[in-house]
Amino acid sequence: MIIAIDGPSASGKSTIAEELGMRLNFKFISSGYLYRVITLIAQKFTLNEYDLLSESKVLELISQNDIKFNGVHFLLNGENIVTHILNEKIDLQVSLYSSYGGIRHIVNKKLKEIVKLGNDNYIIEGRDITTVVFPEAEFKVYLDASVKVRALRRYKQRDGDIILEELEQALGRRDEIDKNREYGKLKLAADVFYIDTSYKCLEDVCRIIIETFNLKKML
């Protein structure tokens, strides 16, 4: 079984999906983490962190590196690099690299392979998960929140090492990129369960989703 969770950046997808995975005993996967791993690969190749590589070059670099999922984390050449992909440096470019059609194809293929080979129940979060990658998921959720709330959440996650106003502006730009990208644009699936998390705590959101999920299973 697959539970797919979609929504804009910093809407709580990873936090909520991971918590739901523990409560429901589903394996948790974040497609965003995979895009961040690819962004890290690209940034290791560039001399300047602001340089942006061409799609063909990134695809070449991906083919030269080994990306695997160990059931908990994505590994890059056998190393758990989760602490290296959750930072502002990666934030600056991940949405740009994830807009490349070839890269999205590789990520989507990798996610489908993991699910096919794993033979487990999965809760998978990311933009376009409910519309492109797993439109056949048994339960689809779209998490939303205002830009101000999302910026504040990300600010707290980073221990205040970035200016809040700049973060809000960056998220606004990210939204525009995600909504207007050629491949895998951010949008609502027709049969998705929508929930605004702006003024809801983690416990409330998880409770609402689990209750709705259980009701759906009974139908």
Image (cartoon, grey):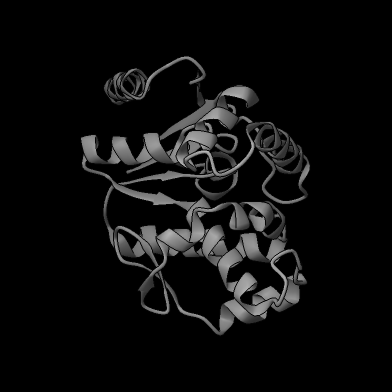
In the rendered view, does 23 fall on the left or right side of 45? left
Looking at the image, can residue 27 be seen? yes
Q: Residue 150: x percent and y percent?
A: 57, 29
* 154 relative to 59 in the view: left or right: left
Tell which of 40 and 62 is nearer to you: 40
Q: Residue 10: where, in percent of width, then height?
A: 54, 36
Q: Where, quadrant-wise, is the C terminus in this rendering?
A: top left
Residue 63 placement: quadrant: bottom right
Image location of residue 85, percent across then percent down:
50, 59
| Residue 138 makes an appearance in the image | no
Instruction: Reply above or below: 156 against 121.
Output: above
The answer to which image quadrant residue 61 occupies is: bottom right
State the residue at coordinates (48%, 21%): 197
Report how many numbered discs are placed on residues in the image.
Answer: 0
Tell me the quarter of the image containing the N terminus. Answer: top left
> Is residue 148 rendered to the left or right of residue 15?
right
Name the foreground residue: 184 vs 149: 149
Q: Quadrant of residue 64?
A: bottom right
Task: Determine the residue positioned at 74% across, 70% down.
Answer: 55
At a point 30% along the width and 57% down the height, the residue shown is: 72
Coordinates of residue 163 in the picture (x, y in percent): 64, 37
> Does residue 145 lie above or below 72 as drawn?
above
Outermost top residue: 199
User: In this view of the protein, which residue sits in the foreground, 193 or 219?
Assistant: 193
At 76% from the left and 68% from the top, the residue drawn is 51
